[in-house]
Amino acid sequence: MLTGRVAFGANNIFTVVVDGESYMCRLKGKILRQDERAYNPLAPGDVVDFETDLHTTGEGLIHRRKPRNNSLVRWNRKRRALQTVAANLDVLVVVTSAKNPPFRPRFIDRVLIAADEIPVVIALNKVDLKYDSSIKERMQIYRDMDYEVIETSVKTGEGIEQLKDRISSGLSAFFGQSGVGKSSLLNMLFPGVDVEVGEISRKYDRGRHVTKNARLYEYGENYFIDTPGIRQIELGIEDRDMLDRYFRDFVPFIDKCEFQPCTHLHEPGCAVQAAVESGLIHPDRYESYARIYYELESRVEYG
Ligand SMILES: Nc1nc2c(ncn2[C@@H]2O[C@H](COP(=O)(O)OP(=O)(O)O)[C@@H](O)[C@H]2O)c(=O)[nH]1
Ligand SMILES: [Mg+2]
Ligand SMILES: [Zn+2]
């Protein structure tokens, strides 16, 4: 029996890597299918025990998955199930761009919630382009909430060393919208790996969808995961009344609301709403909260 890392999965065939060798593996029976709500039993980053086939080289059978330290999960609307994007991360790099595609803070807000306990670094990429100064203020809000923000450029090399230091041990995953520069950053950080880079569609000013599934790469002692660019991430939170706890900037006010529990949407004497009005909470952050709350609500009601 060997122990390896899941690098890639499609159609229930999983590529597992061990010391630079890769094996195409199937699952043994139904042992990995306990969680019925889960859409995929294994994700890039999972550690598995597998047995190799004696007759064919490079093939194997996965017997078990080791317990996960953590996982990045999203709600897959189409499949109506929770999808594990990546597992066992030491750091999640949320990549966003200052321009082309346009900066989308509400996307970042969602990823920060999905990351939960996973340490996060926000990379603001493409800072070589001339961009709106309000974005700097917006990044400061994340810094004020104790999220680490690194400004990067693949064109000028700005911030690359700083980001490299942050991901130089263990397993990192790069997550963000299409076209923000995830694959370009990875090629710069891990020379020689040759991650696929897409062209920006000029017509829509959006990144073209290149990578179809998340994929793990081995790099010496390190691993990293490149994820497909997605437009939106829906959250896998079960209890929408817990949503406010994920907003670090809301936390100092939550217990001061007149009604408990408070949804912070329409109750009188709401301390969160008061904080928005007095400028202590950014209106964009509140907007993120409200949108996600209603989205979770509609998922409950229409099942
Ligand atoms: N100006 C500029 N362009 C970049 C930068 N990083 C990536 N790009 C370009 O943005 C496009 C999309 O990059 P890609 O790495 O495929 O994005 P991904 O979809 O997030 O993996 C490519 O044309 C890159 O050359 C950057 O820092 N500055
Ligand atoms: Mg890419
Ligand atoms: Zn409230």
Image (cartoon, helix red, strand yellow):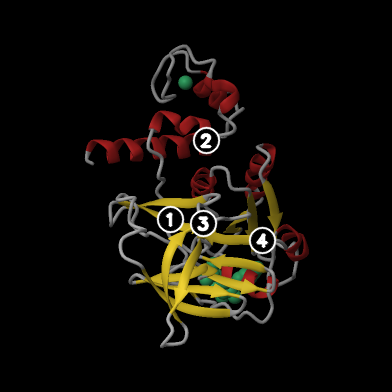
Secondary structure at badge 1 equals strand
**Mark 4 or mark 1: which comes first in sequence?**
1
**Mark 2 or mark 4: which comes first in sequence?**
4
**Mark 2 or mark 3: which comes first in sequence?**
3
Q: Position of residue 157 (x, y in %)?
A: 75, 69
Q: Is residue 120 left or right of residue 87?
A: right
Real-space CA distance between mark 4 and mark 1, rounded to the nearest whole angstrom: 19 Å
- Identify the residue under disc 3: 87
Image point (64%, 57%), residue name: 124
Labelled pair 3, 1 in contact (Cβ < 8 Å)? yes
- Identify the residue under disc 4: 170
Q: Can the viewer see residue 256 in this picture? A: yes
Between 251 and 15, the one nearer to me in the picture: 15
Residue type at numbered disc 1: Thr
Q: How many marks?
A: 4
Real-space CA distance between mark 2 and mark 3, rounded to the nearest whole angstrom: 20 Å
Ligand 3 neighbours mark 2 (CB distance < 8 Å): no
Real-space CA distance between mark 3 and mark 4, rounded to the nearest whole angstrom: 12 Å
Secondary structure at badge 3 equals strand
- Identify the residue under disc 1: 84
Q: Identify the image quadrant of the C terminus.
A: top left
- Identify the residue under disc 2: 246
Question: How busy is the neighbourhood of tag 1: few (under 14 within 10 Å), some, or many (20 plus)?
Answer: many
Q: Can the viewer see residue 181 in this picture? A: no
Residue type at numbered disc 3: Ala
